[in-house]
Image: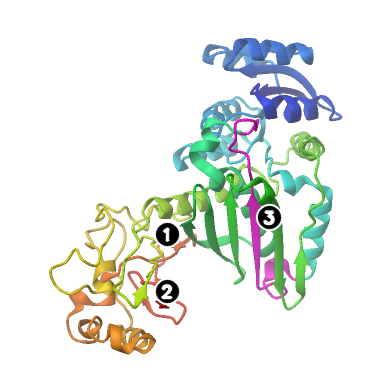
Amino acid sequence: MRFGLVGTGYWARVTHAAAISSTPGATLNAVWGRNQQAAKDLAAEHSATAFTGEDAIGAFLDSVDAVSFSVPPHIQAPIATRAARAGKHLLLEKPIALSEEDAAALVAAVDQAGVASVVFFTLRFFGEIRAWLTDENARGGWTGQGWSGGHGEWLGSVISPESPFNTPWRAEKGGLWDVGPHVLSLLWASLGPVTNVAATAGRADLVHLVLTHESGASSTATVTLTAPLAAAATNLYVWGEAGRSIMPTAPWDPVECLRTALAELIANAEAGEVEHPCDVRFGHAINRVLSAAQAQLDSRLQQVVLPAPLVGVGALAGDRGLPGILGGDRLGHRRGQREGPVEAGDAEEPADPLRAAGQDQGSFDGAQPLVPADDRAQARRVQELHPAQVRDDVRDVAGDEPQDSLSQARRGVHVDLAPDANERTVATDSDGFEGEGVLHAVLRYL
């Protein structure tokens, strides 16, 4: 199969070009790059033809049967869409795009053309990890009966001058979009499709995710590209009735992994098979989780500052007004948000942390207001935590003034990714309190 390579950077040279050239049944016929000299140099190394510039994309596609991509996601998506429409099979990098619009257009083009596609989630093509996933699924896996939860972390240390991966798009989008897809792909394969995600940010690009899976299992993920070098690591495990199972962490060869991906793409293309566990549709599903997490990070509330002796009420701020994930825009779009930190001293009256966390509810498209199930019960629970401090703060919550109720703390901590566009979306806390949002507070005593 004649392959064209889009990209001339480090990963294109050492991984994609090397893998294509050494995969049985594949030849590297063409190289397209934005840098003319780099395209010529890489093409010459593999006796291929070099193409440069947007005007040359058509001729580049005419000379190949399949295209392998090693360019930033926002460059990959439109060229891959064009390649699919031209009937070319696709070996894609993750993430497949940086926007829902681009990702959806790419999937539609692949579906309409009936071409084969594989997204290179590197570790999903590593033999030892594949064997572990097979065993792990046999012991429980997607059913949720064997595994109750899991955790994955990818602590990268690549945003440094000497790293070949210190590229502009990675520096801008961080670990969530670069290594996040790897971890999500593995947790998805271990515990089943993700239906809910909650995200919170740490220092620099550090992101923590809490995931709910269709199986009923839950998991967490931690990703970053800016970890100290001494802390850099990749780990993942699952746990449950079947015990605890740790993913192998032996060094993997990306060229060998990519050869496996290429061989499977070629086999599917020759057989007329368009589905693969890591095809473009799966890549799109991962993108939706990333987009939901990013939307939460972008709309995060500032920390609510409490008077002593209570400090650090952390509001994990999701938003009922996030774009719909698997079911279209059913969650609506937020039209306004109070900006800036909420300080206890801002108001003329004594600070009320529960009121401070509330924001103007505004209006939303495509979603009905959600009413708290029992404000009084929630207020009593808060009072029990620290009765002397919060008695005055929650008096209105337990009374008959709904405008001051916990429903005003309108920040759900997760986004429902269920596919039914007509399903009512409810944010709940750990005790089943449901409402338009829930203030999750961590009360720490001095």
Q: Report the amino acid beneath label 2.
A: Val
Q: Residue at x 57, y 60 (%)?
A: 194
Q: Is residue 129 above or below residue 93?
A: below
Side of 398 where 205 appears, left or right: right
Q: Which residue is mark 3?
A: 186
- Please report the residue visible at 76 percent of the width from the left and 63 percent of the height from the top: 246
Label 1 secondary element: loop
- Residue furthest to the front in view is 446
Query: Which mark, residue 442?
Result: 2
Near mark 2 (Cα within 10 A), the count class, few <14, some 14-19 or many ≥20, is few
| Colouring rule applied to residues | rainbow
Q: SS class of the residue under badge 3?
A: helix
Residue 25 x, y percent position in the rendering:
84, 28
- Residue 105 in view here: no
Q: Give the Cα separation between the discs numbered 2 and 1.
A: 33 Å
User: N-terminal of the two: label 2 or label 1?
Assistant: 1
From what the image shows, is residue 377 above or below residue 426?
below
CA distance for labels 3 and 2:
31 Å
Q: Find the magenta span and give its range.
A: 140-165
Say which amino acid is labelled 1: Ala
The quarter of the picture where residue 359 lies is bottom left
Residue 295 coordinates in the image, percent (x, y): 41, 51
Residue hosting label 1: 421
Pick the residue in front: 232 or 77: 232
